[in-house]
Image: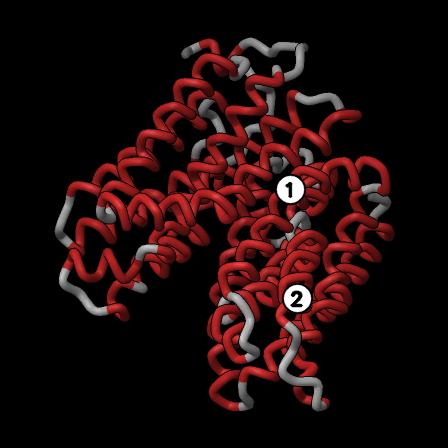
Amino acid sequence: MAADRGRVLPTSASPAAIIYLAAGNFVVGTSGFVVVSILPEITAGLGISLAQGALLFTIYAGAYAIGSPLLISATGRIGRRRLLLIAIATVVVSALVCALTRSFGAMLAARAAAAFGGGLYTPVAASVVFATVPEARRGRALGFVFAGLQLSQAAGLPLGVMIAQQLDWPAAFLTVAGLGALSAAGLWWALPRGVAVPVTSLRTLLDAGRDLRTLLAVSIMALHACALILCYGLIAPLVMRHGGNVGLAIGAFGIGGVIAGVTMGRVTQALGARRARMIALASQVAILPVLSLPLIGIAPLPGWLLIVQALLWHLLAGGMMIPQQILLMQRNAERGALVLGLNATMNYLGFALGSGLGGLVVAGLGYDWLGLAGGTIAGLAVVVSIQSERLYRRAGL
């Protein structure tokens, strides 16, 4: 693999390479979130409380947020093909450890390792697409690669539940490891060698941390994710309060996300990344307050409305990462994957903040205020996006 660093291929990545990059994202997404869907089985198997078990996701989110930009900056001189293979191999090994160990401490360590692998894989995969796919097809290619993450929520997590129920929870992690090994083999075969990307370092990370434009741009992701998870994290009790079908609502949310992942690339190509991002941001401002209609006496909400709301919500908002990453890459050509790593950090920080705020809103005001709270934070994301664009326009970007 020594050729990874030197030779630059003028040809673009093949369709097979794009497919395997998306498959890797499916594995990363399933690995990251599968513990949420099978947590009762894991805690029973390890003999720990649900509160302790929740640390398995908390440590993943924290390690991802902290590790992604640091690892990307520290591995800037490693060939992209080799780095992607190392990242997916880390996810595979961590899944095997989770499947085979009965030590809670070892499982926590494996979850942190999985986060480091995922925190490397997803931003680097995006930078490879950006470097190897012509601009005319870049949006669609990015959309397809990130559809792997959306599909992990719609299909990967239910698959984990089904396997855990039929074969016990370690089998879910073994399945992740097996799919990861297949993805790694496909990446080794299909990815071009010598992908040319700017070399990053810890100095690059420090420079990005001092750049107000960059920090404001990635903070949009944090606010968007915060608004989304604030409501989605409590979607089950919200739907149950109105007598709706939780499974159908969550399924509609997942389907909307998959469609968004597949179509947002085309939307971005047609409308431009700035307009596509604004559609995704503004959609939550309009859709989330539907969950607060009981405050004005419209309750219970019809079950079909909750299903349509969930579908439209993720259909319009779920693809925001695609135009966001295109804008970041266009405006930060020298920092490349590093800025995408910062964006991923903000995404997970937004998840953590949204989860905490959701609990505070429910404790202080009640479930019916969640929609308004989420819509307000989404509105703040729109305001920050407008201000961010002003700064870039002043800089001639």
Left or right: 223 in relation to 193:
right
Q: Nearer the viewer, residue 334 or 43?
A: 43
Left or right: 59 in relation to 324:
left
Which residue is at a point 67% across and 51% down the rendered structure image? Answer: 214
Circle 2: residue type? Trp
Q: Distance between the Cα atoms at labels 1 and 2?
A: 24 Å
**302 relative to 202, above or below:** below
Q: Residues within 10 Å of mark 1 (few under 14, many from 20)?
A: many
Please identify the quarter of the rendering in which residue 86 is found.
top left
Q: Nearer the viewer, residue 343 or 158?
A: 158
Q: Give the structural element (helix, strand or loop) at label 2.
A: helix
**94 relative to 315, above or below:** above
Which residue is at a point 64% across and 54% down the rendered structure image? Answer: 218
Residue indicated by mark 2: 304
Which residue is at a point 59% across and 56% down the rendered structure image? Answer: 253
Q: Nearer the viewer, residue 189 or 130?
A: 189
Where residue 273 appears, x then y in whole percent? 79, 43
Dot placed on the residue nearer the N-terminal end, 1 or 2? 1
Where residue 93 appears, x then y in whole percent? 27, 34
Left or right: 62 in relation to 339:
left
Q: Is residue 341 visible?
A: yes
Left or right: 239 in relation to 56:
right
**360 relative to 345, above or below:** below
Circle 1: residue type? Gly
**233 relative to 18, above or below:** below
Check the image and tell me how it is coloured.
Answer: secondary structure
Q: What is the quadrant of the C terminus in the image?
A: top right
Where residue 187 appears, x then y in whole percent? 46, 20
Residue 261 tag number: 1
